[in-house]
Amino acid sequence: MTMKRKVAGAIAGVALCGMAASASAVTVMGVTWDPNAPLDFSSQQSVFENLVANPGDTLTFYGIVNQINGAGGFTSGELTFVGQYTVQDVLDVDSDAVPDYVIFSNGTLDIFSDSTPDFTVGNLASASDGGLFLSLTGHTNKVSLTGDAGSPRTGDLFGTITNGTLGSNAGGFGSGLWDVAGGAAQIYFDTNTIADNLGGLADFRYTTSFQEQNGMAVGTAEMFGDSIPEPGALALLGVGLLGMGAARRRSKGAKAA
Ligand SMILES: [Ca+2]
Ligand SMILES: [Ca+2]
Ligand SMILES: [Ca+2]
């Protein structure tokens, strides 16, 4: 094979890998998404939680993912989840006897891909059957809270109460960070792209809002991060680039001689 052909072959190899990466949706456990989509990675989900009021209380939440990267239709089954937090602090920063912030720690979140959809509100088991798609743990981050003399504070999730009082028609929002810890899709999501203000990097940013309804907190949540194409494709791309570099070096050497 001539040098020209070798170089052309290496470039074609890189081009093929590039095409495969940009056009390639990934499917894991029946869940399909495109790591190169403009919104990657983002998801939107419905969340249902018990009410909490005091430090030490356990918040259990569960629900169903409605959209990935801005669209539905990512599974013929269902993608559901169950998670927990412990209440670390309840803060009344303006001393009016009405809590303003709730800080959570010890976060866990398991996401399940279920090929036989059966999700039902009020039935935790319907959200935790199927295969373990992704397992996450809360990532401690540092946040300054408006009006809080003790700021900045650290925790996994920071909740702000915007109306009502805890346990009595409260509403609000929250934000926090997650680390990938396991599951079939682990290698696609452990990308360390979110700064935690403590010098570390998390995999997902989490935002949520809720209202109390009939003894439950009901709301929506979003997860934002970055996913990568199949690591095998990346390895191929690396081999292609190595090959191209070697061919270029040999080509330069030939010109010099
Ligand atoms: Ca208050
Ligand atoms: Ca299910
Ligand atoms: Ca990580």
Image (cartoon, rainbow, N blue to C red):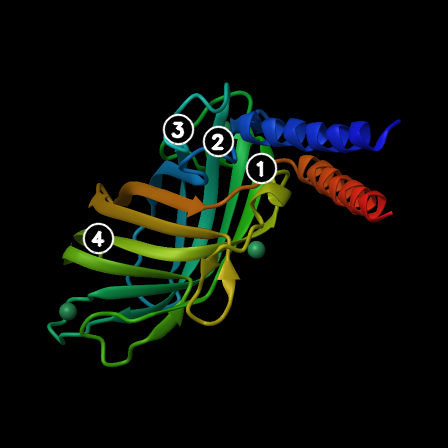
The residue singled out by tag 4 in the image is 172
Q: Is residue 221 left or right of residue 82?
A: left
- Of labels 3 and 2, earlier in sequence is 2
Q: Within the image, what quadrant is residue 69 found in?
A: top left
Q: Name the residue rendered at 70%, 27% in the picture.
A: 12
The answer to whether the residue labelled 2 contacts the one labelled 1, judged by CB atoms less than 8 Å apart, is: yes
- Label 3, label 1: how many angstroms apart (C-alpha)? 19 Å
Residue type, mark 3 in image: Thr
Q: Is residue 62 left or right of residue 191?
A: left
Q: Is residue 57 visible?
A: yes
At mark 2, the secondary structure is: strand
Q: Name the residue rendered at 28%, 62% in the picture.
A: 53
The residue singled out by tag 2 in the image is 79
Residue type, mark 4 in image: Gly
The answer to whether the residue labelled 1 contacts the one labelled 4, judged by CB atoms less than 8 Å apart, is: no
Q: Could you say which disc has been placed on residue 87 in the image? A: none
- Of labels 3 and 1, earlier in sequence is 3
- Of labels 4 and 3, earlier in sequence is 3
Relative to 43, does residue 166 appear above or below in the rendering?
below
3 or 1: mark nearer the eye: 1
- Of labels 1 and 4, earlier in sequence is 1
Residue type, mark 1 in image: Phe
3 or 2: mark nearer the eye: 2
The answer to whether the residue labelled 4 contacts the one labelled 3, judged by CB atoms less than 8 Å apart, is: no
The residue singled out by tag 1 in the image is 133
The answer to whether the residue labelled 3 contacts the one labelled 1, judged by CB atoms less than 8 Å apart, is: no
Q: Residues within 10 Å of mark 1 (few under 14, many from 20)?
A: many
At mark 1, the secondary structure is: strand
